[in-house]
Image (spheres, rainbow, N blue to C red):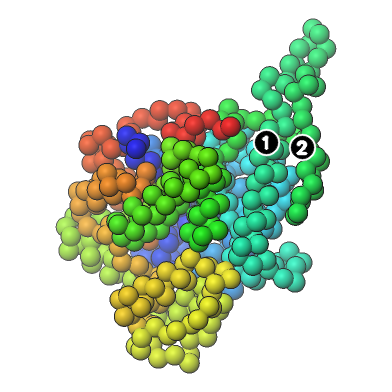
Amino acid sequence: MRDRLRIGAFLSGTGSNMGSWRHPDAVTDGAVNFDHYLSMTRRAEQAKLDFVFFGDGLYISEKSHPNFLTRFEPLTLLAALAPATENIGLVATLSTTYSEPFTVARQFGTIDLLSKGRAGWNIVTSPLAGSAANFGKTDHPDHDLRYRMADEHLDVTQALWGSWEDGAFLRDPGSGRFIDPSKLHAIDHVGEFYSVAGPLNLTRSVQGRPVLFQAGASEAGRDFAASRADAIFAVQGELNSAVRFRADLHQRARRFGRAPEDLVVLQGIGPVVGRTAAEAEEKFRAIGALTDIYVALAYLGRFFDDIDWSDFELDAPFPDLGDRGRSGWQSATDGIKAQARRADLTLREVALGATTPRHEFIGTASEIADKLAAWFEAGAADGFMLDCPVLPSGLSDFVDEVLPILVERGLFRSEYECETLRGNLGLPAPR
């Protein structure tokens, strides 16, 4: 078990809540406001957080989260943030389903060099079927096929990152030798989905390659994460399920010849901090009230193939939807249906819960710090990713109020230990 928490921050425009743009603290154009992102990133770096993270998606509709309707292409954003920061990791999402390995290797390899070893790639397979039409495709690959594609995509990308051995570039004017050609390697990959000759026209960074993040929770997703990822995002709403999830990933990792220490499991949380427990509850209630029920229903519907809820009674038990949603957000929709059955929730309660989920991390700074420590000590997580419902105030509340308590208890750093993201996460050098 690691000796200290690892903590990152998901910076999503105005915040994770569907109605966050309406909050009085919000920067309403936050999703496309570079100064807003730069300010939050620098604030996170001052607090010594491990990384900031930027999500992405390839398909929108009028039902999309307001932060998704228009937002920066995340790798371009990382390139802008790299020279403006010094220590904090810079992580972004990119889809294997709709990206070519050679391009991905160049893009993330460049970010890793620009940032001097602070880049991370969150690997996704694009769950929304509408993505296909934006890339001239008639069919969107099914869930398991997308993961097979991702596995080969990553094989190719990692091979490309290894095109140049360390010490390949001599740059010796006296001898006239710029490179040692024996240390340059083509990959000559021919597989089921990709054919790539290589080599990559880019050398490696000081951390070897970008840190690989993944968030799959389905069977295929867990196997992919356990076999390939360095850091894994999880969203388990209860301590015991989080302990089981992390233990399951460790068991799978061993099956793939990896050690548990090769993985960092980060639980996603949306902390709401108050001076008193009552104030925290009132802040949480006010955030929930920002989202209209019909907006919440539209958002929930995207997980279930854009279902029209008008045929269902809002205050009746959540309906039996069969396999709807299985081809896209498989683990998410399975979890929603299971929770609705277990707690006997209505459609209204499920919809509002999807946009403003209740969780343990609502309370005073000391209460939240106690719960973070309890999860860490129980083996539920190696750390956490902050997915604050409202930004920038949610991030400020956490780093100003909760983090000093964790530092005082020796559960979080007071200074960065390393110059690379891999080093600060406590991950081994890539093989």
Identify the residue at horizontal 27%, vertical 59% (top origin).
360
Q: Is 47 located above or below residue 394 in the figure? A: above
Q: Say whether residue 191 is left or right of residue 23.
A: right
Sequence order check, earlier mark of 2 and 1: 1
Crowd around label 1: few <14 · some 14–19 · many ≥20 (10 Å):
many
Identify which amino acid the numbered label 1 is placed on: Trp
Q: Nearer the viewer, residue 217 or 19?
A: 217
Residue 314, percent across and down? 38, 88
Q: Is 302 in front, or is 54?
A: 302
What is the spatial separation of the Cα atoms under label 2 and label 1, in whole angstroms? 10 Å
Residue under the image location 48 percent in, 92 percent down: 311
Q: Which residue is mark 1?
A: 161
Q: Are marks 2 and 1 in contact (CB under 8 Å)?
A: no
Q: Is residue 68 left or right of residue 337?
A: right
> Could you say which disc has been placed on residue 187 in the image?
2
Corner quadrant of residue 112: top right
Q: For this rendering, which residue is in front, 89 or 47?
A: 89
